[in-house]
Amino acid sequence: MRRIIVAVGTTATGLVLLFSWPTSWNRPVAGGGQATALGGAGTTGTSQGTAATGAGSSGSGSTAPGIATVDGAMVQTPYGNVQVRLTLTDGSVTAAEAIAYPDQGGTDVQISNYAIPILSQEAVQAQSAKINMVSGATFTSRGYIQSLQDALDQANL
């Protein structure tokens, strides 16, 4: 009888400790959901994707004819927000960059610094969102691809 009581007590204690252990799903986000852009400027997770189209119009202030930028939707991942900005020249994707990405910890920064250049290069080469995900950066890759697809949809590509 005493063994049963000890076993139940130990099991209950173990379950309490297990469920109180912090994970990536319940980790608080510093800055109220703030993600940092690659250039170091902060962007908030509440902005929606916007498109600037037409000759001489762009979201980044460019005035060259036939050049436009399109921002994809901000996609939430368990490790932080991801948002992609496309640069289009005459209807073709000439650049893809992440303007927001997971950067809340050392591992987040390390993974983002490795994965995002690969994803950006693939997006320009493929001219679509049908790109390979980066191994070890599954959530960042999924967020990048979703934001990329949204930007492509806004650009009607």
Image (spheres, rainbow, N blue to C red):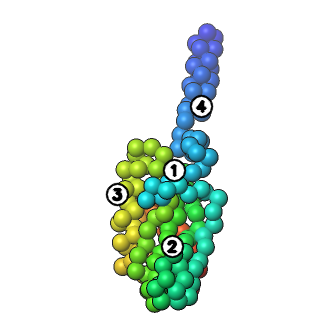
Q: CA distance from mark 2 to mark 4?
A: 44 Å
Q: Which mark is residue 34?
A: none
Q: Which residue is mark 2?
A: 60
Lower sequence index among marks 1 and 2: 2
Please give the count of numbered marks on the rendered protein.
4
CA neighbours of label 3 inside 10 A, class few (<14), some (14 to 19), many (20+): some
Q: Which residue is mark 4?
A: 20
In this rendered view, identify the residue nearer to me: 5 or 136.
Answer: 136
Q: CA distance from mark 2 to mark 3?
A: 25 Å
Position of residue 65 measured from the top left corner of the image (x, y, whole percent): 48, 89
| Mark 1 or mark 2, whichever is nearer to me | 2
Question: In the image, is residue 85 above or below residue 112?
Answer: below
Q: Which residue is mark 3?
A: 114
Question: In the image, is residue 74 above or below residue 8?
Answer: below
Determine whether, in the image, residue 32 is placed left or right of residue 106: right
Position of residue 86 measured from the top left corner of the image (x, y, whole percent): 48, 75
Q: CA distance from mark 4 to mark 3?
A: 31 Å
Question: In the image, is residue 118 above or below residue 88?
Answer: above
Amino acid of disc 1:
Tyr
| Pointer 4 with pointer 1, Cβ within 8 A | no
Q: Residue furthest top?
A: 2
Q: CA distance from mark 1 to mark 3?
A: 15 Å
Q: Which residue is mark 1?
A: 79
CA neighbours of label 4 inside 10 A, class few (<14), some (14 to 19), many (20+): few
| Pointer 4 with pointer 3, Cβ within 8 A | no
| Mark 4 or mark 3, whichever is nearer to me | 3
Amino acid of disc 4:
Ser
Q: Report whether residue 138 is seen.
A: no
Amino acid of disc 2:
Ser
Lower sequence index among marks 4 and 1: 4
